Image: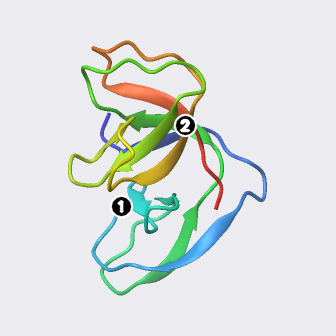
């Protein structure tokens, strides 16, 4: 999976937030917005460029291995490891698992937590 997040279902007219890139990002990057939530890059942005991040939808996210997810588990974004995790400490809220993920699987399906 080359992207950090790949939409499987987007809401028509779904929520977005304005964003000025603090570093270069590419389509599908997960961008932490504090610890309250994340946005997903809809377009690539160079450092300093203005754009929007999606904050609603469902999709597949790069996930930590060694930990299983059950439907309904709260998932966070670990910016250091660049993956979804069930560890809340120091990580941004990503969303809710909408599909079970086996511990050996490196991709999980989530519904984004809308800001």
Tell me residue 14's x, y (percent): 73, 57
Q: Which residue position holds label 2?
A: 59
Give the CA separation, mark 2 to mark 1: 16 Å
> Could you say which disc has been placed on residue 91 in the image?
none
Tell me residue 91's x, y (percent): 36, 53
Quarter of the figure that contains the C terminus: bottom right
As drawn, the residue found furthest toward the left would be 80
In percent of the image, x 38 and y 17: which residue is there? Answer: 68
Locate residue 67: give its quadrant.
top left
Q: Is residue 81 above or below residue 34?
A: above
Instruction: Evaluate whether residue 115 shows in this view.
Output: yes
Q: Is residue 25 left or right of residue 39?
A: left
In percent of the image, x 35 and y 61: which residue is there? Answer: 26
Of mark 2 and mark 1, the one earlier in the sequence is 1
Q: Nearer the viewer, mark 2 or mark 1?
A: 2
Tell me residue 3's x, y (percent): 35, 44
In percent of the image, x 39 and y 45: which residue is there? Answer: 88
Q: Which residue position holds label 1?
A: 26
- Tell me whether circle 2 and circle 1 mark residues in contact (CB < 8 Å): no
Tell me the crowding category of disc 2: few under 14, some 14 to 19, or many 20 or more residues within 10 angstroms, Cα based.
Answer: some
In percent of the image, x 53 and y 28: which residue is there? Answer: 73
């Amino acid at each position: 999976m080359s992207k950090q997040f790949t939409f499987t279902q987007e809401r028509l007219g779904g929520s977005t937030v304005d964003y000025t890139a603090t570093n270069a990002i590419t389509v599908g990057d997960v961008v932490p917005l504090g610890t309250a939530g994340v946005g997903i890059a809809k377009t690539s942005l160079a450092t300093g460029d203005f754009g929007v991040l999606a904050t609603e939808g469902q999709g597949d996210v790069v996930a930590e291995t060694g930990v299983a997810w059950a439907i309904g588990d709260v998932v966070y974004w670990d910016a250091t490891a660049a993956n979804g995790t069930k560890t809340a400490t120091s990580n941004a809220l990503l969303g809710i698992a909408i599909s079970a993920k086996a511990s050996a699987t490196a991709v999980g399906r989530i519904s984004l937590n809308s800001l």
